[in-house]
């Protein structure tokens, strides 16, 4: 599987409160559609598959929300592409493909989310690496 393209259609960030009391973070990643993409520009042995997704980070209770929607263009070997498109008819995704797809979405969306969280002075949606002093015993 090769990533041929990734773009956001929607990026939304709203901070409703400055208080983070009883903060609870929820994330939701949803695949809206998977479809075959026909192209005539390049001769390829692989098939192109388009994916529409949404990714949301909700800071509860009603503190903030980040929302992303986008498109991904992937090049898949013909067998995997047929399997993915066949299973998608029943709104299912093969495990191998789903894991790789979710990792792409999370990686790209999390970078944008971190920038927005920093701008809005929100806590990061995952723990950042920290350096600490080693304590002697």
Image (spheres, rainbow, N blue to C red):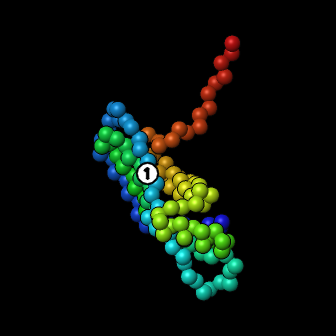
Q: Quadrant of residue 47?
A: bottom right
**Rendered view: 131 above or below 4:** above
Residue at 57% across / 67% down in the picture?
A: 84
Q: Please, what secondary structure does the residue beneath circle 1 have? A: strand
Identity of the residue furthest to the bottom in this view: 40
Residue hosting label 1:
28
How far across and how far down the image is residue 69, in percent? Answer: 43, 62
Q: Dot 1: within a 10 Å radius of its alpha carbon, few (fewer than 14), some, or many (20 or more) residues?
A: few
Q: Quadrant of residue 135?
A: top right
**Residue at position x 54%, y 71% in the image:** 85
Quadrant occupied by the N terminus: bottom right
Residue placed furthest toward the top: 137
Q: Residue at x 37, y 43 (%)?
A: 59
Visible in this render: residue 2?
Answer: yes
Q: Residue at x 55, y 39 (%)?
A: 128
Exactly how many numbered labels are in the figure? Answer: 1
Residue 108 can be seen in this image: no
On screen, 133 above or below 40?
A: above
Q: Position of residue 131 (x, y in %)?
A: 62, 32
Nearer the observer, 78 or 133 = 78
95 or 129, which is in the foreground? 95
Corner quadrant of residue 54: bottom left
Instruction: In the rendered view, tell whether residue 84 sits above or below residue 55.
Output: below
Would you say 131 lies left or right of 92 here?
right
């Amino acid at each position: 599987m090769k990533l041929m393209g990734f773009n956001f259609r929607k990026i939304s960030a709203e901070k409703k409160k400055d208080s983070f009391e009883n903060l609870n973070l929820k994330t939701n990643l949803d695949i809206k559609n998977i479809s075959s993409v026909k192209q005539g520009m390049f001769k390829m042995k692989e098939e192109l598959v388009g994916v529409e997704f949404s990714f949301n980070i909700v800071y509860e209770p009603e503190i903030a929300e980040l929302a992303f929607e986008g498109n991904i263009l992937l090049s898949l070997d013909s067998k995997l592409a047929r399997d993915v498109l066949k299973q998608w008819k029943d709104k299912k995704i093969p495990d191998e493909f789903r894991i790789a797809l979710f990792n792409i979405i999370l990686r790209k969306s999390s970078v944008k989310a971190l920038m927005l969280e920093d701008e809005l002075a929100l806590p990061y949606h995952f723990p950042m690496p920290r350096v600490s002093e080693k304590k002697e015993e």
